[in-house]
Amino acid sequence: MSAAAINTTSLIARVAEDLRDRIIAGELRPGERLSETALAASFDVSRNTLREVFRLLTKDGLLRHEPHRGVFVSVPSAASILDIYRVRRMLEAQALARAYPGHPAVARMRAAVEEARACRDEKDWQGVGSANMRFHAAVVDLADSQRLSGFYAQVAAELRLCFGQLRDPELLHAPYIEMNAAILADVEAGRMAQASEGMERYLQQSERMILAALARATPNP
Amino acid sequence: MSAAAINTTSLIARVAEDLRDRIIAGELRPGERLSETALAASFDVSRNTLREVFRLLTKDGLLRHEPHRGVFVSVPSAASILDIYRVRRMLEAQALARAYPGHPAVARMRAAVEEARACRDEKDWQGVGSANMRFHAAVVDLADSQRLSGFYAQVAAELRLCFGQLRDPELLHAPYIEMNAAILADVEAGRMAQASEGMERYLQQSERMILAALARATPNP
DNA sequence: GCATATTTGTCCGTATGTATA
DNA sequence: CTATACATACGGACAAATATG
């Protein structure tokens, strides 16, 4: 095609990942309509290929499809945030409650906490955010279910779309590093009930902050 | 196109639903390869349209995609059953534990139990199975999360694909009607912890039976 | 409220690379 | 190893629905 295409992965998979990243990064803003012809030209792919990508991301919740009108970047609402945090509470608190200390995902949790601290020291708030997401993905991995982990990845992508609207990433992630560390310490010590409770508090606090920030960002519904 | 097409829904949505039903009904058997050209002709749609449908059902877990080889009907394994039941335990037991008695989904649970009994009296085991699925979907609805309910619908479709391999639907569903009724009674009486425990027992027993039936059906992996 | 332009929905033909007989 | 079949991807076409003036 155009340039170096020695990639082994499918074209659709590559375009889907690229578009997903652009949406999460806020490059394409919520509510924006995505023209098939324009975007296909921008990605240098055919319309048919792009339409398959649209189907995938629509199922992920990142795009919304309106018949005969087109696809739009999903616009995060208070309702979707409430829903996403219900999912997180169910998955993360329960994964911790049923976990055991020697699980391989615990090592990933620890690595994420350490990287978050390192990024904080260098004021790399973007890095703190990524490490934070990895921590919580690792928590869900404690449940040892491929389907639950995949579902959580989807919901996490939607949540990052919400984050994208809010600037000031320091306030968004920094306060939670040590809460994660405390949860990790509980898990490593086998105090699963306490870890689960800590996660409930974490999620309640995080949800409140996101909702408040969203309300500030969009005064009128 | 061919016959009565006064449907308001999209062609892709209709084909997707049709194909999903055929897969769950066992009309297309697990492991079978689905030829793009042949299936497109059978549905009287173009290959492009069918490819978009394939993407959707692949994300649902009903189809498996192998690059440059085609799409195949997913073949249920013991691993996937274990995974699906992990998901069910997490979602259903927890939804019950956090439920409240006046929730609108409780009415749907009761309706499902009553219909299951009616179908049993008429020896309509297919109907018993459908009512059973509706009961458990209603349980997840107790959590009041659109995303959790959607995710559960996906996993339930995969589970029905597993059921499809096992004949003898009477043994598959009949013993569980009264277990569901007991769980419903607990919920209506506000005994949520007891309802949740009952569901754990239900799922453990159901999982064992499915695994045993699958082992009998496929002696060699 | 109407005529027009744009965009989506869907189909077809074709070229290319990959897997399999 | 060659040949065939098929998935992958492209571009053009047209109808239907929507948006625009």
Image (cartoon, coloured by chain):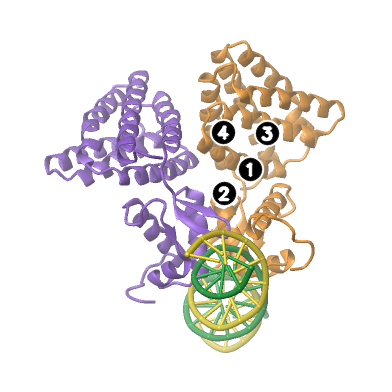
Chain colours: A orange, B purple, C yellow, D green
Mark 4–mark 1 distance (CA, rounded to whole Å): 13 Å
Mark 1–mark 3 distance (CA, rounded to whole Å): 10 Å
The residue indicated by pointer 4 is: A85
Question: Mark 3 or mark 2, which is nearer to you?
Answer: 3
Mark 4–mark 3 distance (CA, rounded to whole Å): 14 Å
User: Residue, x 70% and y 54% (percent of image)?
Assistant: A18
The residue indicated by pointer 2 is: A61
SS under mark 2: loop
Q: Is residue A179 left or right of residue B68?
A: right
User: Residue, x 67% and y 23% (percent of image)?
Assistant: A107
User: Residue, x 85% and y 31% (percent of image)?
Assistant: A123
SS under mark 4: helix
SS under mark 3: helix
- The circle drawn on residue A157 is 1
Does label 4 or label 3 sit earlier along the sequence?
4
- Residue B209 versus residue A135: which sits nearer the camera? B209
Local crowd size for mark 3, using a 10 Å CA cut-off: few (<14), some (14–19), many (≥20): some
Identity of the amino acid at label 2? Gly
Can residue B24 be seen here? The reply is yes
- The circle drawn on residue A133 is 3
Mark 3–mark 2 distance (CA, rounded to whole Å): 18 Å
**Residue extending furthest toward the left:** B122
Question: Mark 4 or mark 3, which is nearer to you?
Answer: 3
Local crowd size for mark 1, using a 10 Å CA cut-off: few (<14), some (14–19), many (≥20): some
Q: Position of residue B40 (x, y in %)?
A: 44, 69
Local crowd size for mark 2, using a 10 Å CA cut-off: few (<14), some (14–19), many (≥20): some
Does mark 3 fall on the same chain as mark 1?
yes
- Residue A160 versus residue B72: which sits nearer the camera? B72
